[in-house]
Image (tube, grey):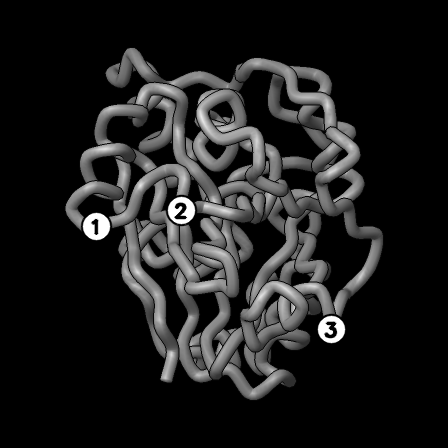
Amino acid sequence: MLSNRAITLSQTNCYLLKANDGYLLIDCGNASDKQSFLSNLGKLGIALADISHLFLTHHHNDHSGLLHFMISANPKIQVIMSSKCAEYLKTGTHYKHRDEKYSNHALRLMLKIYSCLNRDWSENFVPYFTRGSDIILDQDNDYILSELGVDGRILLTPGHTDDSISIVTNKAAFVGDAARNMLNFTGTPYHPILLYDLAACYESWVKLINTGVSTIYPSHGKPFDSERLKILCNHPME
């Protein structure tokens, strides 16, 4: 049975997976989420010292914003990320692919309004330079998680960004922004809010589906049945 605990922050869902020596945290929210993160962690009966690993699905601020705080408070945390994520974190801002665009115009308008009204919204973060203890990935990996006590695999899942990675464990996929489940009424349901390559997005979905996952855990919105992605892959949008 899947043992995970969700922490919902201002913009991002983060997830905790039980590991051998504590917990593996998937993403860590915006820098402004510090108090909310600590409060939610406390309600779960988990201390920051109990987090042994931080898995970053990609470099964006709403996923990596508390990285520096967490490492400062608990230097023993090992960060797991893609090599491209490691490069982008050094810059302190969102990497803009030349082909990046919103999935549809309605989403673009809504996110523009949101960013104007939310004073905590930012594409900038404190630059992070990887340490020798961090785990950097260039390809799919089938063994690192098992070494940590998590029965699962790590997959490269580009489309939203080219540094995106996901965890598949016990029929569940934690996908960051590779898929979403919010604002679906605007159109392009379940597609990333932003993407640079629609074909790569569908290829990542197919890769996830082929692992046999049944539930998708996105960073934005509630978990949903993987069958919904399968249907969209069979009937892709132009």
Q: Amino acid at mark 1?
A: Gly
Circle 3: element type: loop
Circle 2: element type: helix
> Badge 2 local density, few (<14 within 10 Å), some, or many (20+)?
some
Q: Name which quarter of the figure residue 78 lies in.
A: top right
| Disc 1 target residue | 45
Circle 1: element type: loop
Residue furthest left in the image: 43
The answer to whether residue 121 is left or right of residue 42 is: right
In front of the other: 62 or 71? 71
In front of the other: 35 or 210? 35
Q: Say whether disc 3 or disc 1 marks the residue closer to the N-terminus.
A: 1
> Badge 1 local density, few (<14 within 10 Å), some, or many (20+)?
few
Q: Is residue 129 visible?
A: yes
Marks 2 and 1 sit apart, C-alpha to C-alpha, by: 10 Å
| Disc 3 target residue | 142
Q: Do callouts 2 and 3 mark residues in contact (Cβ within 8 Å)? A: no
Disc number at residue 50? 2
Disc nearest the viewer among 3 and 1? 1
Which residue is at a point 71% across and 16% down the rendered structure image?
A: 91
The answer to whether residue 69 is left or right of residue 140 is: left
Disc number at residue 210? none
Q: Say whether disc 2 or disc 3 marks the residue closer to the N-terminus.
A: 2
Question: x, y percentage for residue 212?
Answer: 56, 88
Q: Name which quarter of the figure residue 151 lies in.
A: bottom right
Task: Please identify the quadrant where the C terminus is shown.
Answer: bottom right
